[in-house]
Image (spheres, helix red, strand yellow):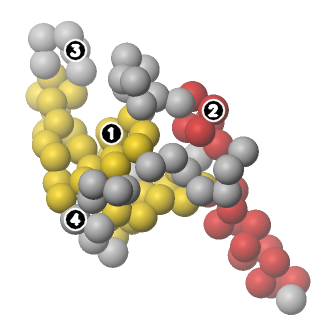
C-alpha cells in the first residue's frame, strides 16, 4: 500500500471515491488544525471536507452533508502508531 492516503476518499459505498481497504486501515483527518472524526468525504488537493448536517437524512436515508473549505491533512492511523513506537525506542 502507499505511504499516504488517497487524495479523495468517501465513506459512502455508492461513491466512486469509496475504498474499503483504505477505510479498514484507518485514516485520520485534520481540518483547520483540528482532528475530525465526523468526516463523510474529503479532498486534499481541492481543500474541502463534507460532514453531516445534524441528524437530517435525504430521501435515500443518507445523511445530508455540508461542504467546508480549508486546509486538509490525512494520514493512516497505523503509521502514526508506528512513528510513536520508533520515537520511544530511539
Quarter of image, res 75: bottom right
What residue is shown with label 3? 61
For the residues labelled 3 and 1, the Cα–Cα distance comes to: 14 Å
**Is label 4 in a helix, a strand or a loop?**
loop
First in sequence: mark 2 vs mark 3: 2
Secondary structure at numbered mark 1 = strand
Residue labelled with disc 4: 70
The picture places residue 26, in percent across and down from the top left corner, at 58, 46
* Picture residue at 32% right of the left edge, 39% below the top: 40
Asked if the residue under mark 2 is in contact with the one under mark 1, i.e. CB atoms within 8 Å, the reply is: no
Say if residue 81 shows up in the picture: yes
Place of residue 78 in the rendered image (x, y in percent of width and height, measured from the top left): 69, 56
Q: Nearer the viewer, mark 2 or mark 3?
A: 2
Work out whether 49 lies above or below 64.
below
| Tag 2 residue | 21
In this view, the residue in front, 53 or 71, is: 71
Pointer 1 local density, CA inside 10 Å: few below 14, some 14–19, many at least 20: some
Mark 3 packing: few (<14 Cα in 10 Å), some, or many (20+)? few
Helix or strand or loop: what does disc 2 sit on?
helix
Q: Earlier in the sequence, mark 4 or mark 1?
A: 1
Between the residue at mark 2 and the residue at mark 4, the CA separation in whole angstroms equals 26 Å
Q: Nearer the viewer, mark 4 or mark 1?
A: 4
Kindly indicate whether the residue at mark 1 contacts the one at mark 4 (C-beta within 8 angstroms): no
Q: Quadrant of the C terminus?
A: bottom right
Residue that mark 1 sits on: 40
- In the rendered image, residue 37, in percent from the top left (x then y), is placed at 39, 52
Separation of residues labelled 1 and 2 (CA atoms): 16 Å
Amino acid at each position: 500500500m502507499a505511504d499516504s492516503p488517497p487524495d479523495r476518499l468517501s465513506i459512502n459505498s455508492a461513491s466512486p471515491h469509496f475504498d474499503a481497504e483504505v477505510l479498514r486501515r484507518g485514516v485520520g483527518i485534520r481540518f483547520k488544525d483540528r482532528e475530525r472524526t465526523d468526516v463523510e468525504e474529503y479532498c486534499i488537493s481541492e481543500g474541502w471536507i463534507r460532514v453531516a448536517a445534524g441528524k437530517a437524512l435525504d430521501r435515500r436515508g443518507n445523511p445530508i452533508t455540508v461542504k467546508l473549505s480549508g486546509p486538509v491533512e490525512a494520514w493512516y492511523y497505523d503509521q502514526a502508531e508506528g512513528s510513536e513506537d520508533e520515537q520511544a525506542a530511539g
